[in-house]
Image (cartoon, rainbow, N blue to C red):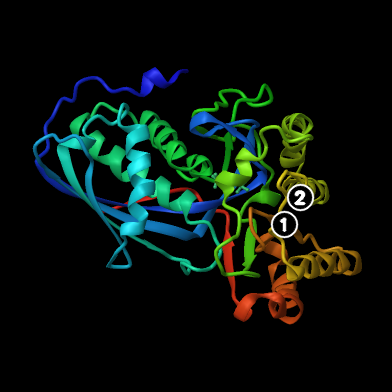
Amino acid sequence: MTEQLFIPEPYAFNLENGKVTWESPSNIALIKYWGKKKHQIPKNPSISFTLDKCKTITSVTFTKKEETDDFSFEVFLDGEKKDDFKPKINTFFTRIEAYVPFLKHYHFKIETKNTFPHSSGIASSASGMSALALCLISIEKQMQPSLSDDQFNRKASFLARLGSGSACRSIEGDLIVWGQTDEIEQSSDLFGIKYPYKVHDNFKNFQDTILLVDEGEKQVSSTVGHNLMNNHPFAEERFQQAHHNIKLLKPILESGDINSFIKLIESEALTLHAMMMTSMPYFILMKPNTLQIINKIWEFRNNTELHLGFTLDAGANVHLLYPQNESDKILEFIKSELVGYCQNGHYICDQIGLGANRIE
Ligand code: PMV
């Protein structure tokens, strides 16, 4: 499949104005995307759990106008005008214009809010860009009703990817693969697909408790981090390893082997951060409390044999992953032993979710 297939036929209907609203979740990668080519084409395949509660809710109100050379839009976060969001959205519109050619024919009012605190250190780009992509494709669907549900989701993911790579994994749930790999049929660098193979019930309703170790802005953006994988001394090995880890994950997901699952995801998380530490310039996004938490988790696992594992994204926060049927004891441990390492004692209880929803 190529990009060309996302350029629409002339639209069947003309719209004067309207409003669409979508809520779209964040996601947490198990096998990490770190390193990209132009336009968020990943250097290796990744796979993620879609989350349920950490979401962005975005409404787009559109009004027909004369076609102009520039995009015409305004952005509000929690009801307040956010002009500092405009450059990112302008770049996004420029990248996707060929695929949604109506953008310069309308004025857009974009109103957005997150269910998680803005300063939580949780990346809102995956949920935010996927919610915006879904609103735009919903508008397109009104002009081109023949778009099937599959085409709709695929194109939403394709557009979201052009906003922020990992956003393409937030359209559907509960396990999403992005990036071409021979291990997974139909996988593509252009958009995310639902993981197409058997997943054991052990992974249904998996819990993700996010420990907010550092609620501030991170010092190095993921764009900078991805770029540092160019000319990175271990890059090629790392990209091969990600392919290999996807191969290892398949039988783990099928058999429900949670111990091997934990080993694999923890290794992926630490490898991601090892890539940061071995970049030039090098950087560290973990904080002392991130390491304290990791050591506590390992100790807890040795003492209890409960199935508590962790993963990290590009920041200091720790995602605790565990099966729902062990949540009573694990939550007790989190509250008594781990919450003290969180900034202001903050954490978020989330779990695997099924993807974005349109709000009527
Ligand atoms: O989508 P980006 O460019 O913010 O990159 C996300 C990278 C990681 O969160 C570290 C890994 C991943 O696969 O989500």
Q: Which is more toward the observer, 237 or 126?
A: 237
Q: In what element is the residue under mark 1?
A: loop
Residue at left offset 23%, top offset 41%: 71
Residue 108 picture location, percent across and down: 21, 48
The yes-or-no answer for disc 2 within 8 Å of ligand 1 is: no
Residue at left offset 72%, top offset 41%: 253
Q: Residues within 10 Å of mark 1 (few under 14, many from 20)?
A: some
Q: Which is more toward the observer, 164 or 233?
A: 233
Task: Judge whether 189 appears above or below 280 on screen.
Answer: above
Task: Judge whether 175 appears above or below 3 on screen.
Answer: below
Whole-number angstrom distance, CA of label 2 to CA of label 1: 6 Å
Q: Given the image, on which type of amino acid does mark 1 rest? A: Ile
Residue at left offset 28%, top offset 23%: 8
Decide: marks 2, 1 in contact (CB < 8 A)?
Answer: yes
Q: Residue furthest right?
A: 302
Q: Quadrant of residue 246?
A: top right
Q: Given the image, on which type of amino acid does mark 2 rest? A: Met
Q: Which is more toward the observer, 348 or 92?
A: 92
Residue 296 picture location, percent across and down: 82, 70
Residue that label 2 marks: 277
Q: Quadrant of residue 96?
A: top left
Residue at left offset 33%, top offset 43%: 90
Residue 173 picture location, percent across and down: 52, 45
Residue 284 is tagged as 1
Nearer-N-terminus badge (2/1): 2
**Left or right side of 339 for 174:** left
Q: Residues within 10 Å of mark 2 (few under 14, many from 20)?
A: some
